[in-house]
Amino acid sequence: MIVDMHIHTTLGSDDSIINPDKLVEVAKARGLDGVCITEHGNKRPEGIAELAKRHNFLVFAGIEASTELGDILIFGLDSYPRQIHRAVEIRQFVVQAGGVMIAAHPFRSDFPKVWDNPWSRQRKVLTIEEACCRPLFQLVEAMEVVNGWATEEDLNFARQVSTRLGIAGTGGSDAHTVPEIGRCITIFDNHIETEEELIAAIKSQRYWAEDHRPEGQKGPLPL
């Protein structure tokens, strides 16, 4: 099963220009078996079941939560209180709902891009040992080791941390524009049809991430 686990659309992300119906059309054309719409905020988008039925295609709804420990992809939870931003508190709602949490692009701020302010690239170099001690990784079932906006250095580091901690790594394009869809993916061993099966598959750790971006295109595509 080939799934793009991290996509934003106009359903709930103001910074995305991807129409949900166009998303499914493109995902099919690019050989994906399913997509996860993970809008920013504290609740998952509505209308996902109808979208999936309309196109006869697997579409899962998730949340990309912003916390003090970093962004987290959540599956299996409808919503949590808007005023909550501490990851450990959000975790309580996720566990109660039987959901899962995935650390999204966990080292994005540690590996500034070439277009960032030059001063931001003079930070202290993060070590694998320091990264492994971050509290975030004690709260999640998986971590994103392939992200469509990440540099090669960032991804190599994420894979090393994933291996060291024994936490499975997922892949997602983090798409906000149509050309980005399916550039980074997660490949599951098991066939998935329902959200419950997706959650079970994430917990099983029987999957791997792949980066399908062409050489020289490691980062977001222009609008």
Image (cartoon, grey):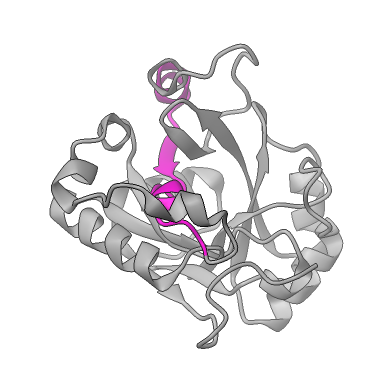
1 or 107: nearer the viewer: 107
**In the figure, 56 relative to 166: above or below?**
below
Residue found 63% across the figure and 67% down from its top: 220
Q: Determine if residue 150 is in view.
A: yes
Residue extending farthest to the bottom is 215
Indicate whether residue 165 is drawn in magenta: no
On the image, the x and y values in percent for residue 205 come to: 28, 55
Residue found 30% across the figure and 68% down from its top: 156
Q: Determine if residue 206 is in view.
A: no
Horizontal side, residue 52 vs residue 64: left or right: right
**In the figure, 159 relative to 122: above or below?**
below
Quadrant location of the C terminus? bottom right
Number of numbered discs: 0
**In the figure, 67 relative to 145: above or below?**
above
On the image, the x and y values in percent for residue 199 come to: 44, 44
70 or 163: nearer the viewer: 70
104 or 124: nearer the viewer: 124
Res 88 quadrant in image: top left
Q: Which residues are magenta?
A: 91-113
On the image, the x and y values in percent for residue 217 come to: 57, 80
Res 140 quadrant in image: top left
On the image, the x and y values in percent for residue 65 come to: 56, 33
Horizontal side, residue 150 vs residue 183: left or right: left
Residue found 80% across the figure and 53% down from its top: 51
**In the figure, 183 relative to 100: above or below?**
below
Residue found 45% across the figure and 35% down from its top: 70
Indicate whether residue 92 is drawn in magenta: yes
